[in-house]
Image (cartoon, grey):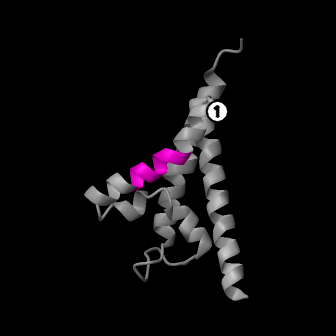
Amino acid sequence: MDDLRQTAWSILAISIAASLSGVAIGSLVLNTPLAIVMTMLLPITYDVTIGAHFTTVAPWISSLAFSQWLANPQWTWLARFDNTIGLGSALCSLLLWVVTPLAAGWLRQTKKEVK
């Protein structure tokens, strides 16, 4: 039963993080189809290319770090094990993939001329 609960929480955590990222990217680009495509493809391709070339930086700028941390929170700044995400990586991922596009989209929408 605990495995089922953990699996359900992991799916919910990934859904929450993906929804937040989708809203942030959508507010930035102001185009729904493009935002959907970017939300689905950009994090995967970004993680693969960055992970292959910059292995030391990849856990800190991974688009999946926040959702992995939500699924299995570790309250230390750095990860204790290789398969976990620390609080620092999770907050960096949240800042890079949710807060920054959301703030930029909010600024863009406030400066946009009403038609």
- Number of numbered tags placed on the structure image: 1
Answer above or below: position of 54 versus 88. Answer: above
Label 1 secondary element: helix
Q: Could you say where residue 104 lies in the image, as x and y percent from the top left?
A: 55, 36
Q: Nearer the viewer, residue 108 or 23?
A: 23
The region drawn magenta spans: 40-47
Question: Callout 1: 10 Å neighbours few (<14), some, many (20+)?
Answer: some
Q: Nearer the viewer, residue 80 or 67?
A: 67
Q: Could you say where residue 88 lies in the image, as x and y percent from the top left?
A: 47, 67
Answer above or below: position of 85 versus 52. Answer: below
Q: Could you say where residue 13 lies in the image, as x and y percent from the top left?
A: 65, 65
Residue 4 quadrant: bottom right
Q: Could you say where residue 96 lies in the image, as x and y percent from the top left?
A: 49, 50
Q: Quadrant of the C terminus?
A: top right
Residue drawn at (48%, 73%), measured in percent from left and top?
86
Residue drawn at (70%, 87%), measured in percent from left and top?
2
Left or right: where does residue 18 sit relative to residue 58? right
Left or right: where does residue 35 sit relative to residue 79? right
Residue 114 quadrant: top right
Residue drawn at (57%, 48%), measured in percent from left and top?
99
Residue 71 quadrant: bottom right
The residue carrying mark 1 is: 32
Q: Quadrant of the N terminus?
A: bottom right
State whether the magenta stretch is mostly helix, strand or loop: helix
Residue 49 in view (yes/no): yes
Q: Nearer the viewer, residue 23 or 36?
A: 36
Residue drawn at (65%, 67%), measured in percent from left and top?
11
Q: Can residue 45 be found in the magenta stretch?
A: yes
Q: Amino acid at mark 1?
A: Thr
Residue 105 in view (yes/no): no
